[in-house]
Amino acid sequence: MRLKIFLIFIFLVISNNSLASIRIGIDCANLVNQLGGLNKINLLWLESLNEKKYQLALINKKNKNLDSKFYLCVNKHNINTTSDKTLTVLSERNLEFITSNSIELFTEIFSLTSKGSRKYIMQTLNLNDFDINRNELNQAYIAGLMKLNEKLNPTKEIKKEENKKPEKKLVKKVENNEKERLINELNNLDTSDYYFFGHSSEGKKYTGSTKAATNTVQVGKVYSTDNIICYVRSEQKTFNPPFNGSFILKCPEDKIDGSWQQQSLYSPGIGQGFSDKGDVVTAFFSRQKSVIIEIANKYFDQTLDKIDNTPTQKIVTQKTNKDNTPPKIIIANNLTFKNSSYKLEGKVVDEGSKNIYVEIDGIIQDAKNGKFVFERFSPVDEQVKIFAIDQWGNRSKEKIVSIKIERNLKTAQKKIEKLNPSSKVYNHLSSDKVAIIIGIEKYDRTPTASYANDDARYFYEYVSLGFGVPTENIKLLIDKDANLIQSLGVLNKWLPAKINKNKTELIIFFAGHGLASNNGEDLFLLPQDSDPDLLQRTALSRNELFESIIKLKPKNVTMFFDTCYSGISRDEKTLLASARPVRIISNNEEETPSNFTIFSASKLDQISSGLKEAKHGIFSYYLMKGLEGKADANKDKKITNGELLAYMNENVSQKAAELGREQNPSLAGDPDKVLISYR
C-alpha cells in the first residue's frame, strides 16, 4: 500500500514538473508530448482570419482532473504547411494562449478565427466539453468580435492621443498622481474579507472592501475617483471551483449589475458589469490586499495581461435571473438603395438589458440608444444576416434583409416596381359584386403561359380590396382547377346562384391561352386540359360565354382577358401541333352589349407578352398598376375605362417594343364609365 502511494506521488511530481515547463511560445508538438502524446489530448483545428485551414489548434487533456487548462496554438510565423502528419504541423505552431476559463478561451478564439470557424463553434461544438453554456458563449462571442474590431479598426481616441504628443508628459503626470492616490486608498482600507478594485469604460476607478454578511454574501463600501460613495453586494452562486457569482454596485445616480468568476477560494477573481447609463465596469477582488494593489499598479502601467491565472479579457458571465429574452431586431425585410455604398440602419429592443450588441458579417457594434448603423458596400443585390445579443448572452434569431441596389432608380422602378393592391383605400364591400378569376400557367397539351398563375392570384387581391367583392363571392381557378369540367361547372352552376337580376356586378379575369377557330370567325379561351386541335369540344367559346352571361341578366359585366388568339404563347411558342395558319376575322367586340366592358391584352393578330422583370403578363401588370391609381390621369380619385386604357396602351406598347413585338390593349365599352374609385 505504501509503495502504491509512493508511486502515485512520484507520478504527480513528474507530471507537475512536466506541466510547469509549459510556457508561452513553445512549439505545440513539444506541448503535446509534455501533455502525454496525441492519444492523451483533444485537438480541434481552426481556420485563421484569412480562412486558411489548420492555422490554430485548440488542445486540452482528455483527463481534466490532471490538467483542466486549455492551450491555443497559432501559426505565428505564417509557415506554409505541406505535411499531413499531425505532430509535424503542430511543430510549426506555437503556444499563444493558456487559460482554465472557457469564456476567456472563446473570447480569444473568436478574435483570431475565420467566419466559418466561428459559425462551427456557435452551431456545432459540444459546449459541455468546455464547461460553458450558450449564453456565456454568446457573451464571449461579443467580446471576441469587439476585440477583433479594435485590431482591424483602431479607435479614434487612440489616434487623437497619437496626435497630441506635446501633452504626453502632462498626461503621464496626471495618471501618476491618480495612481499614487488610488494605491494609498487601497493601503488605508480597513481589514476585510475581500478587497476590491475596478475601472470603467468611461475612465472611473473604484476601490473598496467587503465583509461577509452570510456564507455566500459579501457587502461593503466602494469609493470612486470622483469622490462618490457606492455600496457593493456580492453573492456566490456556485460551490465548486471555478466559483461564479453576481454583484451589484449601487451609486447615488447609477447602478451597476454584473457577474464574476474566481478560479479557487484564494485566487483573485474578475468580473464585469453594466451600468444603467451603458458604462462597462471591470472589477477585480482578492482576499489579499497586496494582490489588489499589484493589479491596480499593472492597470496603470498598461501591462495588465495576466494576473495569477485570472482571465485577461473582459469576462462576461451569465446572470440567469436577470433576463432570458433575446433582443428583437426592428428593420424592414426589403430595402432599396441608389448607391453601392449605403448605410444599413435599424433598431433593437430588449426589456431586460441596457447593452445590446448587433453583428453583421463578423462586425459587431454596441447599439447606442437601441439604434445601429452599419456602413456597407455592394455593387450587386445582397442578403444581409443580422444578429443581436444582449449583455446577458441572449442571442436573437437571424434577421435577413434583402438589399436591392438601383443606380438608376427611375428606370429600375419602372421595370420592377412591386404590385401593391393595398396602396389605396377603395370601394366598400358589396354583396352585389361577384368575380370569377382564372389563371392557367401549366397546360396539359400546350406550352406554358408564363406567370399566368401569379396574374390571377394578384388580381384576386385587387378584386377583393379594389372592387370590393366579398371573398365568398370570388371563385379563383388555378391550373388543374381550371380544367374544362370545373370551368363549365363554375359558369353554369356556381355563377347563376350568385347573380341577382339587374343588381349584381360581375367581374371576369382570364390569364392563359386563347385561340381562333379554323375559319377565324370565333374566339376560344383554353381551359387547362384543352386540345387546340379540338377547340369546339375542349375550349370555351367567347360568344357562348357572353350569351350565357347575358341570360343571367347581371347589372353590368367587366371582363379582362390577358390572352391572345394568334396561336403563339407569351414565350413565342406555337400552340398548334398541326402548325396550321391562324386566320382571325372575328370582330365581335363591335357587338358587345351596352352593359359589358371588355379589356383585351392585345389586338387579335398580336401576341400577349410576359414581363420577366415583374414576373407577370405585361397587360396584367399594367392593369393592376393602373388600378392602384397610376391610371388616374386627372387625379380626381376616379379611374375611368378610358383612363385605364390610355395608361395601359402607353406602357404595354413600350414594354412590348423592348421585346421586339407589337402589343396594344383594346377596350370594348363606354370609355367614360367610372371603373373604380378610391379615397
Image (tube, helix red, strand yellow):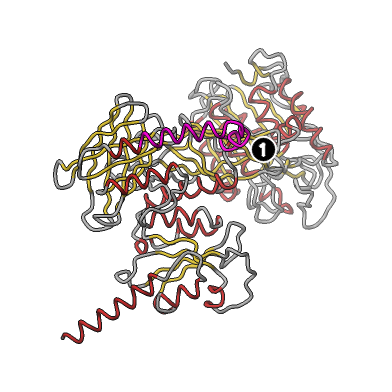
Residue that appears at 22% across and 36% down = 220
- From the viewer's side, name the closer residue of 21 and 398: 21
- From the viewer's side, name the closer residue of 335 and 366: 366
Disc 1 residue type (three-letter): Glu
Residue 472 is situated, as x and y percent measured from the top left of the image, at 47, 33
Verify whether residue 163 appears in magenta.
yes
Residue 331 is situated, as x and y percent measured from the top left of the image, at 52, 34
Residue 496 is situated, as x and y percent measured from the top left of the image, at 52, 33
Residue 548 visible in the displayed image: no
Q: Secondary structure at mark 1?
A: helix
Neighbours of disc 1 within 10 Å: few (<14), some (14-19), many (20+): few
Q: Specify the quadrant that holds the N terminus.
A: bottom left
**Quarter location, residue 82:** bottom right
Residue 63 visible in the displayed image: yes
In the displayed structure, 432 sits above or below 127; it is above
Verify whether residue 585 appears in magenta.
no
